Image (cartoon, rainbow, N blue to C red):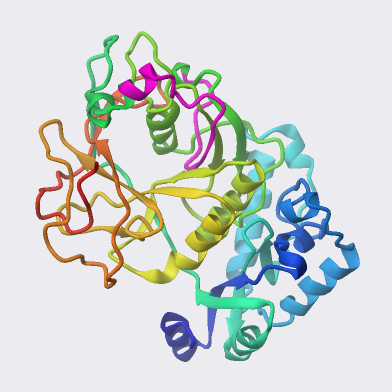
């Protein structure tokens, strides 16, 4: 049965941007093993996929055939916007001082591409009309076709200076992370995927914490030679929450010996293309945990296909549930197969669902970690502002269970 949102878009305007989920290839190998061979159209350089490492032989001609078969179902509905984005990328490569010289030397085509494939996720994205959607749905290699959602950043609602001091954040104590540290669990050897506005590689609280960095331009292409940077403060703030190192200004990173594979994917441009490119890159980096503060307000199943692909790739998504306050949540942070993150204050109870869920499902919710509103977190200036969110009011929050 066709996705209702897709059907509505096709009826209203005649075309829609879709995410296509692909079935595993022959012998149980990911379809990405085939797509990874397509060097001419891959969005980013790739190491051999899991399927290829298991000895699944895939020829370049077979991969090209797969892409060509799928490409014929996609369209470019309006060339004005894609061409404008491509031209903006070209201008940015020439003028942006933060980009490496190597980036400006890379030849780029202003021609919009019909579709993009994400081999490690077994996903593809592009525009289709009704005929293309019907053909994709009938293709035996296609598991599903859904309308692509557009996510937005989940930002704190305020920031204020925090008094520095060599103390452990009350949020760390509230989570009980200090007890895990004492037992030797500090994240050593773990690389966490981090998709956000980037990360300030020079911040002292993140010294030695960045294992890999990738920047994706407004069309979702990898920027060659990009160095760690933050296009806003948000990415550095969330990075500090995850892996911030202890120092003169205290301890506030939950896993102070873990590292990040950080991708700059928001905001602006083709947001969903950039996010999927970042996810595919993160899987390639060997990450099994992904942190994202992105979402659609309320509940929508629109991103479920992507989350399912992440889980199938062995990745646990840890996603913010929103900062809109009591009786609200965001997708995909409110999905049953993610770890949901919300805010608490220093005297708050643990969250629990005392009322029926606002999500239309009878599935139980995942256990949630209690994140702390008011934690000291890293900012690009080296300061430690306190970030706050509206206070959830237990026991009436509809999307949480008590942690145990």
Residue located at (15% from left, 66% from top): 356
Residue located at (37% from left, 31% from top): 241
Closer-to-camera residue (87/13): 13
Measured as percent of width and height from the top left, residue 71 is found at 73, 76
Residue 111: quadrant of the picture: bottom right
Above or below, 138 relative to 88: below
Closer-to-camera residue (266/368): 368
Residue located at (49% from left, 34% from top): 230
Residue located at (77% from left, 79% from top): 69
* Stretch of the chain drawn in magenta: 179-203
Closer-to-camera residue (18/309): 309
Closer-to-camera residue (177/232): 177
> Considering the image in quadrants, where does the C terminus appear?
top left
Measured as percent of width and height from the top left, residue 227 is found at 63, 31
Measured as percent of width and height from the top left, residue 129 is found at 59, 86
Above or below, 132 relative to 65: below
Inspect the magenta stretch and tell me whether residue 90 lies in it. Answer: no
Q: Is residue 8 left or right of residue 220?
A: left
Work out whether residue 76 can be spotted.
no
Magenta segment main secondary structure: loop
Above or below, 369 relative to 146: above
Q: Is residue 346 left or right of residue 375?
A: left
């Amino acid at each position: 049965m066709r996705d209702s949102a897709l059907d509505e878009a096709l009826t209203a305007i005649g075309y829609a941007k879709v995410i296509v989920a692909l079935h595993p290839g022959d012998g149980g190998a990911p379809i990405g093993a085939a797509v990874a061979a397509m060097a001419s159209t891959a969005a980013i350089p790739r190491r051999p996929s899991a399927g290829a490492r298991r000895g699944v032989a895939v020829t370049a001609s077979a991969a090209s055939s797969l892409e060509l078969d799928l490409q014929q179902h996609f369209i470019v509905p309006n060339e004005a916007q894609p061409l404008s984005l491509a031209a903006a990328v070209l201008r940015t490569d020439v003028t942006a001082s933060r980009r490496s010289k190597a980036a400006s030397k890379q030849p780029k085509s202003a021609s919009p591409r019909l579709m993009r494939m994400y081999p490690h996720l077994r996903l593809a994205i592009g525009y289709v009309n009704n005929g293309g959607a019907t053909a994709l749905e009938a293709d035996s290699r296609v598991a599903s076709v859904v309308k692509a959602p557009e996510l937005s950043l989940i930002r704190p609602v305020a920031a204020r200076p925090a008094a520095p001091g060599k103390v452990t954040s009350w949020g760390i104590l509230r989570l009980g992370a200090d007890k895990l540290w004492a037992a030797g669990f500090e994240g050593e050897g773990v690389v966490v995927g981090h998709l956000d506005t980037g990360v300030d590689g020079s911040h002292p609280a993140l010294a030695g914490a960045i294992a890999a960095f990738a920047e994706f331009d407004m069309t979702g292409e990898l920027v060659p030679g990009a160095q760690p940077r933050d296009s806003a403060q948000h990415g550095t703030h969330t990075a500090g929450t995850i892996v911030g190192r202890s120092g003169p200004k205290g301890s506030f990173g939950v896993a102070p010996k873990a590292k990040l594979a950080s991708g700059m994917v928001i905001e602006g441009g083709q947001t969903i293309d950039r996010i999927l490119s970042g996810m595919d890159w993160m899987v390639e980096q060997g990450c099994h945990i992904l942190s994202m503060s992105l979402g659609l307000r309320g509940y929508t199943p629109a991103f479920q296909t992507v989350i399912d692909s992440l889980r199938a790739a062995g990745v646990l998504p840890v996603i913010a549930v929103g900062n809109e306050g009591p009786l609200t949540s965001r997708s995909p942070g409110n999905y049953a197969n993610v770890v949901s993150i919300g805010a608490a204050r220093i005297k708050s109870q643990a969250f629990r669902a005392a009322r029926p869920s606002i999500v239309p499902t009878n599935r139980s919710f995942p256990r949630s970690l209690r994140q702390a509103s008011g934690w000291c977190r890293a900012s690009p200036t080296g300061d430690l502002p306190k970030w706050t969110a509206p206070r959830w009011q237990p026991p009436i929050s509809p999307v949480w269970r008590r942690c145990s």
